[in-house]
Image: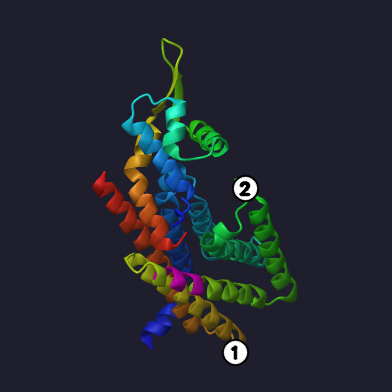
Amino acid sequence: MAAKKRERLEVIRDIILTISRNRGIKPTRLLYASNLSPQMFKEYISELIEKKFITLEIDKKEKKFFTLTKKGQDFIQEYKVIENFIESFGL
Amino acid sequence: MEIQNFILGNSELFRIIYGLVIGLICMTIFLKTDKFFKLSFHEGIRYFRNAFFFYGLAFIVRYFLGVLLVPSVDYLIILILFEYFIVLAGFSLFYSLIWKRFHFSNSSVFNSKMIFFHIIALTIALLDAFFIIGNFMFYSQIIIFSCASIIAYKNYTKNKKQKFSKFYFIAMFLELFAWIFNLITVSIFEHNPLLLFNIGIINVIFFLLILCGVLKITKNGCKKT
């Protein structure tokens, strides 16, 4: 049975939740966890960084990792409400 | 009879209050959903907000500014602006329900679909002004709300767990009825002021239903956080 295709908002929620559960998650690990193609992953990550939901940082060993911004944390808290709003109005 | 005379005798005051009330309801809906849009950039929410932004502008222009500025401003300009905003609002509301089937790129208020809506809305407003009738606006809104009512009903039957989806369908159907009633009032009853007053009440109920839904959902969100 084929898995149901995720909506854009669900994908964003999954990425942000993964980052919130793993402090300082590396890009490769996030890619595997997101269950996206590398191309789609890159597009989503670019959008999330551009819209300031997440940031890409570099540690002392020059390793890259993603962290959540305040806006990203707000998104997690509000996600259920947004989802409820979208379903209520059929948007 | 006394109430009728009171309404007819103070029609300008009622028009101003009507415009302000609906304008305020629409702006509240627009502002209350701001956070949702900024967090999600969901296209459905974008067009939903656009709709109530334009509805608010339409009613404030026609019933508030229209009463205060006439005769210094040509009433025809007020009517053209009113029709333009109202038709645009109708398209935006309808598109908020069907955007997934047509979405191809990142959008803004002036993306290709909105430009199409702007052109159609302006065409309808100018046609009505040219022919000095409001029928093009009525027909466009009747078609839009017929389709929107069907989609809202389908959404309700698919998702009965969502209590508000039933009220959203009722709101859409109510507004469809208001537009049909409005066309009949203008075409057959020669703009009977009391019938128009009743249509105004239906409009207020429509906007209040939407506002109640928005406030209820955002209030629940605040409680959880």
Task: State which region is magenta.
Answer: B150-156
Q: Earlier in the sequence, mark 1 or mark 2?
A: 2
Q: Which quadrant of the figure has residue B39? A: top left
Question: In whole angstroms, how far apart are the C-alphas of marks 1 and 2?
Answer: 45 Å
Q: Is residue B193 above or below residue B31?
A: below
Q: Secondary structure at mark 2?
A: loop
Residue A1 seen in this snapshot: yes
Whether discs 1 and 2 lie on one chain: the answer is: yes
Residue A38 falls within the magenta-colored stretch:
no
Q: Main secondary structure of the magenta part?
A: helix
Q: Is residue B199 above or below residue A31?
A: below
Three-letter residue code for mark 1: Ile
Q: Could you say where residue A2 lies in the image, as x and y percent from the top left? A: 46, 55
Q: Secondary structure at mark 1?
A: loop
Q: Which mark is residue A68?
A: none
Three-letter residue code for mark 2: Ser
Q: Which mark is residue B188?
A: 1
Q: Residues within 10 Å of mark 1 (few under 14, many from 20)?
A: few
Q: Chain of mark 1?
A: B
Q: Residue at x 49, y 73 (%)?
A: B149
Q: Could you say where residue B157 lies in the image, as x and y percent from the top left? A: 40, 72
Q: Are marks 1 and 2 in contact (CB under 8 Å)?
A: no
Q: Residue at x 48, y 64 (%)?
A: B19
Q: Residue at x 61, y 58 (%)?
A: B102
Q: Nearer the viewer, residue B44 or B93?
A: B44
Q: Residue furthest right?
A: B130
Q: Could you say where residue B134 lies in the image, as x and y percent from the top left? A: 65, 76
Report the side of B165 relative to B176 (left or right). left
The count of marks equals 2
Q: Where is the C terminus of chain B found, in terms of image quarters?
A: top left
The residue under label 2 is B105
